[in-house]
Image: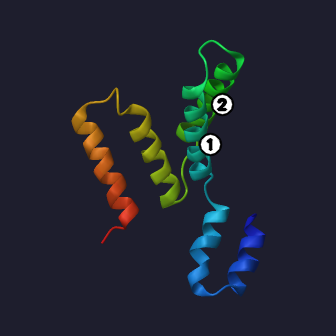
Amino acid sequence: MDRRSFIVAASAAPIAAIPALAAQVGDQHRTWLEEWREARAAWRNEIEDTPEERDYWDKSIRLEDLLYQTPARTTDGALAQLEWVLEDSKDFSELEHYQALRLAVETIRGGLV
């Protein structure tokens, strides 16, 4: 949805619907994260050294590039980036870093006070 469509829709929408409309204008990070999860799961289930395995791996790398190179414009977009970092690095990062990221994600997901 482009900005003009958003403004028209927002002016006609009830106040409660505006955040959902704003998300349509905002980030694609959540979509990229879900696609990355699917590609990684498919990659894990493929036989090694097959074209299909390489295709799933390449797709996951392209999605990672989008996740880390594209600035988030919404809280949900930033949350999707944090979730990706958390999921992709849990085997490689310091335990304390993992726990801190997990808590940050839970706090943002639950809403700040």
Taking the spot 61% from the left edge, 23% from the top edge, the residue there is 46
Picture coordinates of residue 44, whole percent (x, y): 54, 27
Which residue is denoted by mark 1 in the rendering? 35
Please tell me whether residue 27 is drawn above or below residue 45 in the rendered image. below
Residue plotted at (68% across, 84% down) = 13
Between residue 74 and residue 84, name the one nearer to us.
84
Tell me if label 1 and label 2 are in contact, CB under 8 Å.
yes
State the SS at label 1.
Answer: helix
> Compared to 56, does 107 lie above or below?
below
Q: CA distance from mark 1 to mark 2?
A: 9 Å
- SS type, badge 2: helix
Q: Which residue is mark 2?
A: 59
Picture residue at 55% right of the left edge, 47% below the top: 71
Measured as percent of width and height from the top left, residue 64 is found at: 56, 34
Classify the position of the C terminus by image quarter. Answer: bottom left
Residue 9 or residue 4, whichever sits in front? 9
Q: Tag 1: Cα neighbours inside 10 Å, few (<14), some, or many (≥20)? A: some
Determine which quarter of the picture holds residue 99: top left
Q: Residues within 10 Å of mark 2 (few under 14, many from 20)?
A: some
Nearest to N terminus: mark 1 or mark 2: 1
Residue 83 placement (x, y as % from top left): 44, 46
Colour logic: rainbow
Q: Mark 1 is on which residue type?
A: Glu
- Looking at the picture, which amino acid does disc 2 mark? Lys
